Image (spheres, helix red, strand yellow):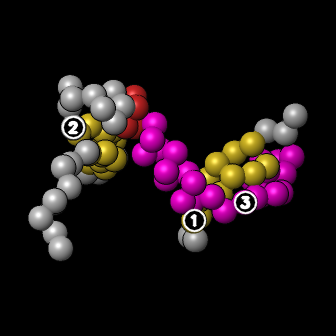
Amino acid sequence: MADYHVGAGCFGIYAGTLNKKGNLWQNKTECTDEAINAVRDYMVQELLGGLNCTKTSSSGYQWTLKDGRIVELRVAIKDGDTNKS
């Protein structure tokens, strides 16, 4: 079975296989929207407890860069504005 990888490039997120050296894409498919939606769904389920859970409405991950800055990836569920026309 092929060893699949996911990676980001200048023009999107890709999934596919790499060559035997593992340094070039052999077959790839652009899957940016699908990947982002999958990450969103995973974070809502794992970090917030699902769409109907009320324990929290926001959570995420964070990483510290070598220079001390922090990168955050967050997901939040907010009430929609029902007064919009």
* Visible residue check, residue 8: no
From the top left corner, tell me how far across and down residue 71 is, in percent: 31, 49
Q: Secondary structure at mark 1?
A: strand
Q: Using residue 23 as the reference point, say whether residue 60 is left or right of it.
A: left
Q: Secondary structure at mark 3?
A: strand
- Answer with mark 2 or mark 3, whichever residue precedes in sequence: 3
Q: Earlier in the sequence, mark 3 or mark 1?
A: 1
85 above or below 36? below
Q: Amino acid at mark 3?
A: Thr
Q: CA distance from mark 2 to mark 3?
A: 33 Å
Percent coordinates x, y for residue 82 in the rendering = 16, 59
Q: Which mark is residue 52?
A: none
Residue type at tag 2 = Ser
- C-alpha gap between disc 1 and disc 2: 28 Å
Quadrant location, the N terminus = top right
**Label 1 Cα neighbours within 10 Å, binned few <14 / some 14-19 / many ≥20:** few
36 is higher (above) or lower (below) than 43: below
Inspect the image, locate mark 1, and give the three-letter code of the amino acid beneath it: Gly
Q: Which residue is mark 3?
A: 29
Numbered label attached to residue 12: 1
The image position of residue 13, as x and y in percent, is: 59, 59
Residue 7 part of the magenta segment = no
Residue depicted at x 79% and y 49%: 17
User: To which residue does mark 2 refer?
Assistant: 57
Q: In the image, what residue occupies the spot 69% across and 52% down?
A: 15
The span picked out in magenta is 18-42
